[in-house]
Image (cartoon, rainbow, N blue to C red):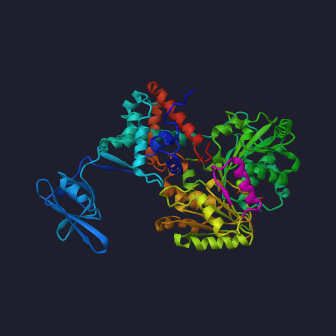
């Protein structure tokens, strides 16, 4: 069957988008034609209604004027060319002087034109209206209004615009919302709205287009919040007598629990003994000991004859968990299931799962696809749970949530946000690190200090410590000054031949990735140059140095996560954030001030808006419509949803909205664990 080209196709189907542009778009989260359409212009250049000079104010605008005398050009000191124009309104009422630098060739075109357009700011200089270095046009673009997109390194604005234009022509004409719905709420159709946003004829049309998406997103987001806040209920709750097991569990550990761990374990025990299925999120910074809290739940379940699953996002993590479970819970009670196991190993594992002799079933996604099911499953623990969708977890949990669910996350939800959506009672917070953990000294590094920083790194590497270097790009892109992993790797290998470097990025085959990680974990490579694939929790206690290049390209919460990869061992740890911009350095300074993930999460939310933190808003898209602190706005959308639910003519629209909300909650990367 021939593949049809449409909004779901990769961006490379668009004219002018080759591998380099594709990478530039991918770095901004855009992979498909639809993604490109969902990235709205940040502003517009409006060429439809130029002003007269008499309307000048202190803002930048487009002006139309006529020439009063031939342009005069002069070369002055230092090879600078100045072209001076005297212009006026067509009726001769207002005059202005214009100075244009280093474009002598413009003179002829300007003289030949009937009128000219000045794009810039008019200032009063010695009582005379003056333009210094405006953009000068002799003809206006045919589009009238030209969209301005967020500048992406490696993609020229003209190319970006051309690709979007082609993308618009691929839009399907049908609309998921009925025409009754559209009329009722005075909305443009989807296709019209995309055109209005990306290729508006007037600025008013552009606003109508955005309104359509804002409205849709407001409905879906509100519905998501309702879904997220809904309590999970189940009829056949498996009650586990967990409270009475706490003491024995503590006694069995080789270390003393922190106060926070004790508190969380008590909360879990209360859930397991309650009349509803547990649905709890344990949040805590990297290294706060979330796994042990989860082990307690698994231990209590096993003591009552139940089996538990522990689902990890990568093989490395799954093996690490299996190893600690064997150490802390009993070596003969653990079964590990991963995708790279042989058929014979899988069969043996399946047998141990089915017989129930191994109550601790630990594995990766492979667990979801396996047929083997234990006799009395009662608990599903999901580590780094934002890596899994609701639907994936449901394969194990069953549609009605037939198991207790415990999720572990190192991405703290800002407290204010959790309170607002009413999920606070189901979140356990590990806000205390086990004793002996070191704080990570965090410093901002300007471009001119990068060389010193590398020297510092090499010195530490020579004395047996390890370092991560995280770059925003895999390979260098044209016109981009951002660091790429490949380029940094090559540069450092030749600069420090006595230090062993490794390379790790998402475009490498899985086997190579595994071996790069393994080489680093076992200390054979001293420095791992990587992209953000290192984000997921892997223990490398000898890693004491984290360098993040172009740190302003990352969110605060993500930087905090990355920093958490170091400082897990005994030696002093460092995190260096490089950035070319002084402004960015001040935005990131909160990371230098605090290690508290919750404080950083609050700052992150202030920066990005609550909607984005919750994953309500797609990357780069339009305005942040639903600010969950805006209760009046939420109430308004809720009212509309109620109205839709009650009106049979809006039935399909209601179902579509609800399904979109469920899907988004499911698929969102920053899944926050309310489901
Ligand atoms: P994370 O919260 O990042 O998942 P882990 O659960 O992996 O953290 O714990 C990190 C390390 O700290 C593990 O090696 C674990 O055995 C150890 N650990 C956990 N709790 C304590 C404690 N109370 N005292 C000492 N070490 C602990
Ligand atoms: Mg962990």
Front residue of this view, candidates 640 and 521: 521
Q: Is residue 184 above or below residue 54?
A: above
* Residue 196 at x, y percent in the picture: 36, 40
Q: Is residue 568 left or right of residue 69?
A: right
Q: Please tell me which residue is depicted at 26% across the width and 46% down the height of the picture.
A: 48
Q: Please tell me which residue is depicted at 76% across the width and 36% down the height of the picture.
A: 370
Q: Quadrant of ligand 2?
A: bottom right
Front residue of this view, candidates 379 and 71: 71
Residue 629: say if magenta: no
Q: Is residue 74 above or below residue 349?
A: below
Q: Please tell me which residue is depicted at 53% across the width and 48% down the height of the picture.
A: 26
**Rendering quarter of residue 442:** bottom right
Query: In this orientation, does residue 270 appear?
Result: yes
**Rendering quarter of residue 169:** top left
Q: Is residue 247 left or right of residue 555?
A: right
Q: Please tell me which residue is depicted at 39% across the width and 49% down the height of the picture.
A: 158
* Residue 366 at x, y percent in the picture: 74, 40
* Residue 69 at x, y percent in the picture: 13, 61
Quadrant including the N terminus: top right
Query: Which contiguous range is marked in magenta?
Result: 502-525
């Amino acid at each position: 069957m021939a593949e049809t080209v449409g909004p779901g196709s990769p961006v490379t189907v668009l004219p002018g988008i080759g591998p380099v542009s594709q990478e530039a778009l991918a770095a901004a989260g855009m992979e498909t034609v639809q993604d490109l359409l969902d990235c709205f212009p940040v502003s517009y250049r409006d060429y439809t209604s130029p002003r007269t000079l008499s309307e000048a104010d202190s803002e930048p605008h487009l002006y139309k004027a006529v020439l009063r005398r031939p342009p005069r050009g002069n070369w002055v000191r230092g090879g600078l060319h100045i072209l001076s124009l005297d212009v006026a309104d067509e009726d001769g009422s207002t005059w202005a002087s214009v100075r244009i630098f280093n474009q002598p060739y413009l003179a002829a075109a300007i003289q030949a034109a009937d009128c000219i357009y000045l794009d810039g700011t008019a200032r009063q200089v010695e009582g005379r209206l003056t333009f210094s270095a405006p953009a000068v046009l002799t003809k206006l673009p045919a589009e009238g209004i030209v969209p301005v997109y967020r500048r992406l390194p490696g993609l020229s604005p003209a190319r970006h615009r051309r690709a979007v234009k082609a993308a618009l022509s691929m839009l399907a004409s049908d609309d998921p919302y009925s025409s009754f719905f559209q009329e009722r709420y005075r909305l443009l159709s989807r296709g019209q709205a995309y055109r209005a946003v990306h290729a508006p004829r007037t600025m008013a049309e552009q606003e109508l287009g955005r309104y359509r998406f804002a409205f849709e997103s407001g409905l879906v987001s509100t519905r998501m919040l309702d879904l997220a806040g809904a309590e999970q209920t189940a009829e056949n709750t498996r009650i586990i007598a967990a409270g009475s097991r706490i003491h024995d569990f503590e006694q069995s550990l080789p270390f003393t629990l922190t106060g926070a761990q004790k508190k969380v374990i008590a909360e879990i025990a209360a859930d397991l003994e309650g009349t509803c299925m547990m649905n709890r999120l344990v949040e805590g910074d990297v290294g706060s000991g979330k796994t042990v809290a989860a082990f307690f739940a698994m231990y209590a379940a096993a003591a009552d004859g139940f089996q538990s699953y522990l689902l990890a996002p990568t093989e490395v993590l799954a093996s690490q968990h299996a190893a600690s479970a064997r150490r802390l819970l009993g070596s003969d009670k653990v079964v590990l299931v991963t995708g790279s196991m042989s058929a014979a190993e899988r069969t043996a594992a399946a047998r141990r799962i089915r017989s129930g002799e191994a109550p601790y079933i630990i594995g990766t996604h492979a667990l979801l696809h396996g047929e083997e099911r234990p006799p009395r499953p009662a608990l599903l623990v999901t580590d780094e749970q934002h890596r899994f969708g609701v639907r994936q977890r449901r394969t194990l949990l069953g549609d009605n949530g037939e198991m207790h669910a415990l999720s572990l996350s190192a991405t703290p939800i800002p407290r204010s946000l959790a309170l607002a959506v009413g999920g606070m009672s189901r979140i356990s917070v590990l806000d205390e690190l086990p004793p002996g953990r070191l704080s990570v000294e965090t410093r901002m590094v300007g471009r001119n200090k990068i060389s010193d920083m590398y020297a510092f790194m090499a010195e530490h590497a020579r004395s047996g410590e390890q370092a991560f270097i995280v770059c925003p790009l895999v390979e260098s892109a044209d016109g981009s000054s951002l660091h790429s992993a490949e380029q940094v790797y090559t540069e450092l290998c030749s600069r420090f031949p006595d230090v062993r470097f490794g390379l790790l990025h998402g475009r490498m085959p899985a086997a190579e990735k595994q071996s790069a990680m393994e080489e680093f974990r076992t200390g054979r490579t001293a420095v791992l140059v990587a992209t953000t694939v290192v984000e997921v929790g892997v223990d490398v206690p000898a890693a004491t140095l984290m360098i993040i290049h172009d740190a302003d390209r990352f969110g605060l919460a993500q930087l905090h996560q990355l920093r958490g990869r170091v400082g897990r061992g005994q030696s002093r740890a460092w995190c260096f954030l490089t950035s070319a911009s002084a402004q960015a350095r001040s935005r990131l300074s909160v990371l230098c001030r605090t290690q508290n993930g919750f404080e950083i999460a609050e700052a992150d939310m202030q920066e990005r808006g609550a909607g984005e933190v919750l994953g309500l808003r797609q990357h780069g898209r339009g305005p942040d419509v639903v600010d969950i602190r805006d209760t009046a706005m939420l109430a308004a959308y809720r009212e509309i949803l109620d109205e839709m639910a009650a009106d049979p003519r809006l039935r399909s629209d209601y179902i579509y909205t609800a399904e979109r909300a469920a899907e988004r909650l499911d698929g969102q990367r920053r899944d926050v664990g309310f489901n």
